[in-house]
Image (cartoon, rainbow, N blue to C red):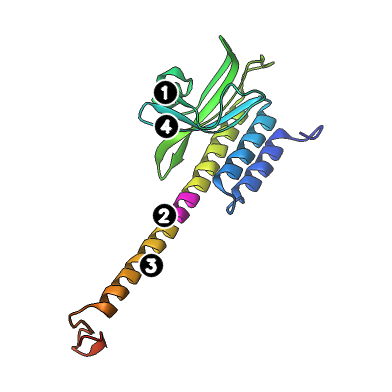
Amino acid sequence: MEEGADPRLVGLKELHRLSLLDGADSRELYRQYLEVGCRLLGLSVGIISRVQGQDYEVLAVQSDNDVIRTGDHFALGDTYCSEVLDTQGSVALFDVGLKLQAYIATPIRVQGDVVGTLNFSDTRPRPEPFSMEEMEFLELMALSLGNGLERSWLETQRVRAVEDMETSVALFEGAFRHAAIGMAIVAPNGRWLRVNEAV
């Protein structure tokens, strides 16, 4: 962060920039969010997860080490994110002890449903607890990320629907043209619109 810059203003600018990443693929979207979160929160590890039932899957990770990798699966109950899912809200832990000294996470929602978590952590101690502004920043990041994922998933569904429609049209055309029996397409008023060779 620039020396003397207002962290709230820097955070808003970064959120705005991230919200404009419409054309980015999921991996690039994840990378950018994690880089910004780690940098602005001053933490070394960032994770975007997907949670299905009791399965916690790491969709993306930014870390100095390879302890956790993209594609790893864990039992949800073995993660700090289980508390995020239990409360359906943000969780911030300071001076946790054990392996982590700092942990902050919030749910990611797509179409109103919690699909995973956005979380940042560090094994190094933090000089002070997380502030309300940092919690709000994280929640806005998750909201923006969820909206980006929703747009991406809707676009994927749209492309798949168009491909399915094109396949169905091609199958119909083939069956219509080459059918051994006569086939016709008739308008509601009884006028013939198309007939095949058999007719």
Secondary element type, mark 4: strand
Badge 1 element:
helix
* Residue farthest to the top, as pictured: 97
Which of discs 1 and 3 lies nearer the camera? The answer is: 3
Q: Are marks 3 and 4 in contact (CB under 8 Å)?
A: no
| Residue 153 on the magenta span | yes
Whole-number angstrom distance, CA of label 4 to CA of label 1: 8 Å
The answer to whether the residues at label 4 and label 1 have Cβ atoms under 8 Å apart is yes
Residues at marks 4 and 2, CA–CA distance in whole angstroms: 20 Å
Residue type (three-letter) at the residue carrying disc 4: Val
Left or right: 153 with respect to 92?
left
Locate the C terminus by quadrant: bottom left
Q: Is residue 142 depicted above or below 25 in this figure?
A: above
Q: For mark 2, give the secondary structure.
A: helix
Q: Which mark is residue 76?
A: 1
- SS at mark 3 in the image: helix
Residue at left 46%, top 30%?
57
Residue 51, disc: 4
Tell me the CA gap for discs 2 and 3.
Answer: 14 Å
In primary-sequence order, the first of circles 4 and 1 is 4
- Which callout, 3 or 4, points at the residue further toward the start of the chain? 4
Q: Residue at x 62, y 51 (%)?
A: 20
Q: Indicate the position of residue 41 as horizontal and vertical percent values.
A: 66, 28
Pointer 2 or 3: first along the chain:
2
Range shown magenta: 151-156
First reached walking from the N terminus: tag 1 or tag 3: 1
Give the image quarter of residue 145. top right
Find residue 129 and report its horizontal and vertical position in percent.
Answer: 62, 18
